[in-house]
């Protein structure tokens, strides 16, 4: 099968390792049912503004706790969903679940800040995607100002015209767009060049920032990307920040936002709600 160029080498290594442990066939067989029955849970990883530590949002990350297989990596089940052509229904299910969660937090008197949803590039290329998103938003009456969609470019982009129409339509709805895993994509630079006016945020992949405190070349490389973001008026968010040194250096370099284990792991609903209450 085709490798996904969109993931960092770490994610690919993880995915390969998981394949040895999980029976791929079981996942292929059971994924359709799991999607139909909405058997996934979401974790919310907080994102912070570096210079003052303010909470600026969350990334929603899907979890599938399989009854026999245990935890199945989303890298694996998203890949299978794409192979089975079920990524479209899956991504819409997640959008619906996130909208319900946002509404619930609002009902509790909490400020959901902003929630970022991963959308498969293949989903974003589908001509009916925006229509379905609108249906969900209308049905659930979810305010779009709390929503962001994260996209990772894949090697096999086909439907570029629909993609660009969809991105513009989502922006018109008030949904923000972030480019995920920037620096590892197949040709993310051309994506940025074509759409930077519609894009809000560049998410620097973990592999780009992991050596910045020990390696001058890595640091200079990351600095140039942060500067590119400045020139294009994009917000830069560093992914996978694991140490205080990385955090300080990224702040000095002019990177605005970050997420990673140094701040928080992806949190379950109870922990997320606790964090939101502490913000009040
Ligand atoms: P991603 O969107 O790039 O998400 C970041 C991944 O890095 C997450 O892995 C997160 O748990 C992990 N991470 C966060 N902070 C750190 C850190 O400090 N160090 C390290 N080593 N890792 C960190 P996760 O949750 O396993 O998700 C993997 C990928 O699966 C995501 O990469 C995304 O591409 C995909 N994915 C997850 N949930 C969904 C979903 O609901 N829909 C779609 N379409 N894709 C999803
Ligand atoms: Mg993401
Ligand atoms: Mg990704
Ligand atoms: Mg990423």
Image (cartoon, rainbow, N blue to C red):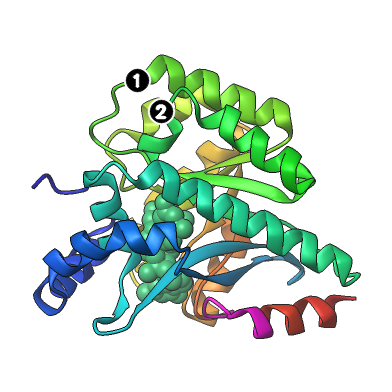
Question: In which quadrant of the rendered view does residue 105 lie?
Answer: bottom right
Magenta residue check for 140: no
Q: Mark 1 vs ligand 1: CB under 8 Å?
A: no
Residue topped by disc 1: 159
The residues bearing labels 2 and 1 have C-alpha atoms spaced at a distance of 6 Å
Residue topped by disc 2: 125
Foreground pick, 240 / 129: 129
Identify the image quadrant of the C terminus.
Answer: bottom right
Q: Among all residues in the image, which is located at the extreme top?
A: 161
Q: Count the labels in the image.
A: 2
**Residue 17 position in % (x across, y down):** 14, 74
When the figure is inspected, residue 272 is found, relative to residue 227, above or below; the finding is below
Extent of the magenta region: 262-271
Foreground pick, 201 / 143: 143
**Residue 128 position in % (x across, y down):** 49, 26
Predominant SS of the magenta segment: loop
Question: In which quadrant of the rendered view does residue 199 lie?
Answer: top right
């Amino acid at each position: 099968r085709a490798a996904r160029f969109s993931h960092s080498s770490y994610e690919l290594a993880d995915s390969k390792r998981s394949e040895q442990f999980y029976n791929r066939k079981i996942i292929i067989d059971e994924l359709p049912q799991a999607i139909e029955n909405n058997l996934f849970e979401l974790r919310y990883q907080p994102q912070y503004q570096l210079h003052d530590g303010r909470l600026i949002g969350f990334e929603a990350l899907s979890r599938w706790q399989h009854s026999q297989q245990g935890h199945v990596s989303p890298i694996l089940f998203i890949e299978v969903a794409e192979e089975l052509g079920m990524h479209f229904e899956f991504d819409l299910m997640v959008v619906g679940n996130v909208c319900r969660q946002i509404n619930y937090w609002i009902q509790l008197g909490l400020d959901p800040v902003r929630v970022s949803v991963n959308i498969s590039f293949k989903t974003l290329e589908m001509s009916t995607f925006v229509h379905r998103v609108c249906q969900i938003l209308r049905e659930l009456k979810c305010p779009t100002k709390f929503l962001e969609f994260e996209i990772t470019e894949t090697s096999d982009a086909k439907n570029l015209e629909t993609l660009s129409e969809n991105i513009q339509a989502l922006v018109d709805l008030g949904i923000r767009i972030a480019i995920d895993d920037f620096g590892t994509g197949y040709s993310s630079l051309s994506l940025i060049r074509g759409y930077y006016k519609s894009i809000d945020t560049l998410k620097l992949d973990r592999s780009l920032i992991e050596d910045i405190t020990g390696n001058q070349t890595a640091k200079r490389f990351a600095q140039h990307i942060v500067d590119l973001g400045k020139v294009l008026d994009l917000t830069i968010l560093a992914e996978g920040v694991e140490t205080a040194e990385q955090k300080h250096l990224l702040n000095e370099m002019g990177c605005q936002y970050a997420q990673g284990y140094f701040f928080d792991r992806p949190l379950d609903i109870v922990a997320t709600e606790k964090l939101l209450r502490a913000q009040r």
